[in-house]
Image (tube, grey):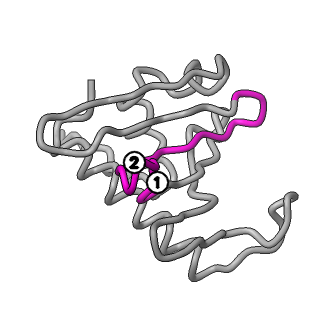
Amino acid sequence: MTTMKAPKVTKCIYERIYDRLNRLTGGINEFVAEHRSLKLQSKGFMDLTIESFGYNGKLALTHYYLLNGDLVPDPDMEILVHPEMKMAEALTYQDTFGFKTVYLDDDRRQFYPSRKKELNQFLNTWLNNLQKQGFYK
């Protein structure tokens, strides 16, 4: 009698982003729902700020640097958490050079497909790098 192993299911990028945010914040659903903010430090890297907007499932993930006495976000991303699906996705990206948004309107029915892919790939890579840099709890 031969036993078969269950096939390994690869998570989609939105599930991987959610998992990484969950580890980074110590519980993403509670973090977002409780309208929290968090400043994480790792020696040799810019501080990381995570801020929840609370009511709408959105949060911001930002590195800030100081320029002429002003804090400049670079990069700064707005992220939407879908707790019921255990997924999260990039909504916006900004840095010193500009701003990009995925959706054309607030109801999120129209979007830029290539930008959606680009920003979520960047977010996934950034979260992976943050782990390697020692920001995770």
Q: Specify the label residue 64 is tagged with.
A: 2
Residue sitting at x 77%, y 29%: 55
Residue sitting at x 22%, y 40%: 3
Residue 67 in the image, given as x and y percentages of width and height: 37, 56
Residue sitting at x 17%, y 36%: 134
Q: Are marks 2 and 1 in contact (CB under 8 Å)?
A: yes
Q: Quadrant of residue 87?
A: top right
Inspect the image, locate mark 1, and give the three-letter code of the amino acid beneath it: Pro
Most prominent secondary structure in the magenta stretch? strand
Inspect the image, locate mark 2, and give the three-letter code of the amino acid beneath it: Tyr
Residue 11 in the image, given as x and y percentages of width and height: 42, 52
Q: Residue under label 1, please give it.
A: 73
Q: What stretch of residues is rendered in magenta? A: 54-75
The number of numbered badges drawn on the structure is: 2
Q: Nearer the viewer, residue 134 or 89?
A: 134
Give yes or no for residue 132 being in the magenta stretch: no
Secondary structure, mark 1, is strand
